Amino acid sequence: MSSINKILQSAAPFRKEMWRRLGLPEDLELPQLDESHFHGAVSDVIHGLQGPTVYLGDWASERGKKFFQVICKKYGVFLQLYDKRTALVQVEMQIENPQSVGGSDEKLDHSTES
């Protein structure tokens, strides 16, 4: 994944062709992702997700939020922003009582502006 990210970041013709094949807007900017997005716990969570929601930290850049909004809209899933403090509290609650965890129903509107 990190190699693909590097190619998409650095090779505009390749990125343009990938966006065309995926049916994404040609001017969609790829957010700056670092190696931590592709290894360890973050990667495990992303690859283990089930259900129609993608979670993104509310501290993400506007460019990152826009990118994931477009991707989510394309694939018919919700983008939900979360804050680190609430996420940590929910993890602690789940560890203490796995039956009691519920998430916020607040979803980020994943419609795009043209």
Image (spheres, rainbow, N blue to C red):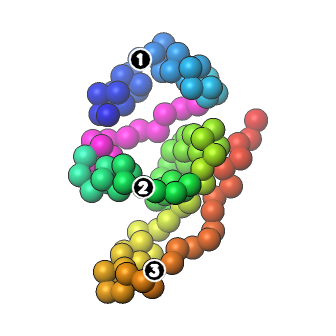
**Which sits earlier in the primary sequence, circle 2 or circle 3?**
2
**Which sits earlier in the primary sequence, circle 3 or circle 1?**
1
- Residue 60: give x, y in percent of width and height: 48, 53
Q: Secondary structure at mark 3?
A: loop
Please state which amino acid type lies under the numbered disc 2.
Answer: Leu
Name the residue furthest left: 40
Task: Depth check: give the residue in front, 49 or 5.
Answer: 49
Please state which amino acid type lies under the numbered disc 3.
Answer: Val
- Residue 20: give x, y in percent of width and height: 59, 19
For the N terminus, give its image quadrant. top left
Task: Depth check: give the residue in front, 78 or 81.
Answer: 78
Q: Is residue 97 left or right of residue 30?
A: left
For the C terminus, give its image quadrant. top right
Q: Which mark, residue 44?
A: none
When asked about the image quadrant of residue 93, the answer is bottom left
Please state which amino acid type lies under the numbered disc 1.
Answer: Ala
Q: Secondary structure at mark 2?
A: loop
Judging by the rendered image, the residue that carries numbered circle 3 is 101
Specify whether residue 35 is painted magenta: yes
Residue range of the region highlighted in magenta in the rendering? 27-38
Judging by the rendered image, the residue that carries numbered circle 1 is 11
Judging by the rendered image, the residue that carries numbered circle 2 is 49
Is 58 situated above or below 77?
below
Identify the residue shown where x is 32% and y is 86%: 96
Check disc 2: other Cα within 10 Å, few if <14, some if 14-19, many if 20+.
few
How many angstroms separate mark 2 from mark 3 (CA)?
16 Å
